[in-house]
Image (cartoon, rainbow, N blue to C red):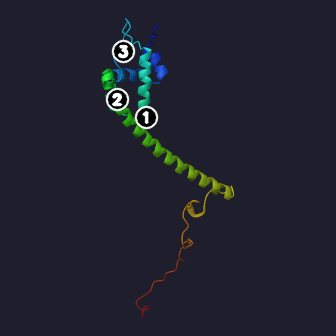
Amino acid sequence: MEVHLTIAEVARRTGLTADTLRYYERIGLIAAVPRAPGGQRRYASADLDWLAFLLRLRETGMPIQGMQAFARLRSQGDASVGERRQMLEQHLAEVQAKVAALQQSMQALSLKIAHYRAIDRKRPSSTGTAPEGKTSDDPPTSKPQRQRQQPALRARTRQTPADRR
């Protein structure tokens, strides 16, 4: 026997809000959901499976327009299997490219963290800051930095034209 869930139960199971579920139905991501005699939506387990797939598409960065296009193709049945497969293959390639870029970023972050850990192990734990606002990974300068000294204030006397001669 098929179990039919209310919108509140589906929202709880999927993490979507009731408003989002209604929106997905309104824009065609979800086919019209059958209603109980009182007008309440009743979702079937197949609806939950489809929602789970839509959430995967959303989590992997597919835009709503792409999800709508996929839903339209899905509604055509087996006649659109090839187009749906191509669409998913293209999306998968985009996801794989993003994952590869994220892996490169993760590697760069890991290297920087290892660098900072090595610096932390070398220095005493008392200060926590490098002199003159420098960080420990700033490149060395070719000349040591000199602190500027304020010129001594000179007492100025008024010179008259006669003094200048």
Can you tell which of label 2 and label 1 is closer to the viewer? 2
Residue receiving disc 1 = 60
- Residue type for callout 3: Val
Residue receiving disc 2 = 84
Q: Position of residue 111 (x, y in %)?
A: 56, 52
SS state under label 1 = loop
In this orientation, does residue 99 appear? Answer: yes
Residue receiving disc 3 = 33
SS state under label 3 = loop
Dot placed on the residue nearer the N-terminal end, 2 or 1: 1
- CB-based contact (under 8 Å), mark 2 and mark 1: no
Residue appearing at x 40%, y 39% in the figure = 93
The quadrant in which residue 6 appears is top left
Q: Quadrant of the C terminus?
A: bottom left
| Category of crowding for the residue at label 2, using alpha-carbon neighbours closer than 10 angstroms: few (below 14), some (14–19), many (at least 20) | some
Dot placed on the residue nearer the N-terminal end, 1 or 3: 3
- CB-based contact (under 8 Å), mark 1 and mark 3: no
Q: Position of residue 148 (x, y in %)?
A: 54, 72
- What is the C-alpha distance between the residues marked 3 and 2? 23 Å
Asked if 50 appears above or below 40 in the picture, the reply is below
- Residue type for callout 2: Arg
| Category of crowding for the residue at label 3, using alpha-carbon neighbours closer than 10 angstroms: few (below 14), some (14–19), many (at least 20) | some
Figure label count = 3
Residue appearing at x 43%, y 91% in the figure = 164
